[in-house]
Image: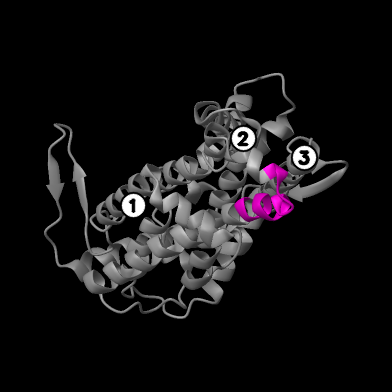
Amino acid sequence: MIFWELKKIFKSNIGLIILVLFVFLSGCMSFLKPTLETENSYRNNKYELIVDTRPGNEIAKEKFDEKINQIEQIANTYVDDKFMNKIIEVSRDNLRFMKYREYKNIDFYKVFNHRASHPFGSVIMIIILILVFSNIYTDEKISGVDNIILSSKNKFKALYSKLALAIILPLIIYGLYLGIEFLVTLVQYGTPINGELEAFRIIDSGAIFLSRTYTINEYLILKILTMALIFISISVFSSFFSFISKNSLTSISGTVMFLVLGKAFILIKFLPQQLLIILSKVNYVDLIFYPDRFIGIYSGDVNFLGKSLDVINLCNSILILMLFTGLAFCILTFKNILNK
């Protein structure tokens, strides 16, 4: 029945909008790239753009040396602070296990990393998912098909197929997007090489705050898995609001409120400080717009039920818990609301 659901989506007007948005997304992202290691530009006091015209290798060497100097400064620091001690430990590991202490070409990985989680791409992806799953059941209600589904002996099969689609389709769409950008980046920057080198080479800001010595490949896998988890959980909750709403407008509004709720809670000053720290990392708005502040970054510990827990590990657990909570809400809706 999943194929029937897909067929229904792409036969509707929403299917055409989704295709247009996806083509638009893939096309736009193919032109977006970060400032490469071999490039350098800045704006002066008059806001005029100044482009560094030195040879690319010279610019890249200078940037790499700056990163190494920054890491060395941290590694040679001695402080009595738990947060900094973790950063110092990772900095020393980066220096100890560094395969090449010189610049190596990582253009492909830097561009692909940029495109894999760019806020513009994430927003378009979320719009696509909300359009699909906020209407996954409200369309049935408007057309009266829901009565046929609920009176059928295969009603749970039909409902669970919609829920399964909320898990599968984000993976398909995000996977297709990554596949297209991989091929485009391959054409633009050549074969990916040096993926076994240190992840800090492709990170412009926050490189010294990595939670461990990731390789570039490990870091990209972690980022892709995290973004996929975010997209799936949004799809599941969007489906949940569709199951309990009377029309798509209500369903979309519920999904949007769910996405901004965590960010709104940060503004509530009377919440416990430990909770505010967690919400500042795990709310969907910041996850979408600033993923590099979350993925692979060390953010210290919080005290929870008398135990000291790593903030990012706890936030990852919350993300996974949110997904299972959304699934549980949908299943309870099937059994206790739609089954009445």
Query: Which quadrant would residue 284 be assigned to in this image?
Result: top right
Q: Quadrant of the C terminus?
A: top right
Q: Nearer the viewer, residue 210 or 265?
A: 265
Tag nearer the camera, 2 or 3: 3
* Residue with the mark numbered 2: 241
- Of marks 3 and 1, which one's residue comes earlier in the chain? 1
Secondary structure type for disc 2: helix
Marking on residue 247 = none
Depicted 83 relative to depicted 200: above or below: above
Q: Which residues are drawn in magenta?
A: 150-162
Residue 52 appears left or right of 7? left
Residue 197: percent from the left, percent from the top?
A: 45, 75
- Of marks 1 and 2, which one's residue comes earlier in the chain? 1
Tag 2 and tag 3, C-beta contact below 8 Å:
no
How crowded pointer 3 is (Cα within 10 Å; few <14, some 14-19, many 20+) is rated as few
For residue 76, say whether it is visible: no
Residue 322: percent from the left, percent from the top?
A: 69, 45
* Residue with the mark numbered 1: 19
Q: Nearer the viewer, residue 121 or 279?
A: 121
Which amino acid, by three-letter code, is at mark 3?
Answer: Asn
Q: Residue at x 43, y 41 (%)?
A: 127
Q: Residue at x 20, y 50 (%)?
A: 41
* Residue with the mark numbered 3: 339
For residue 153, say whether it is visible: yes
How crowded pointer 1 is (Cα within 10 Å; few <14, some 14-19, many 20+) is rated as few
Tag nearer the camera, 3 or 1: 3
Label 2 and label 3: CA atoms lie apart by 16 Å
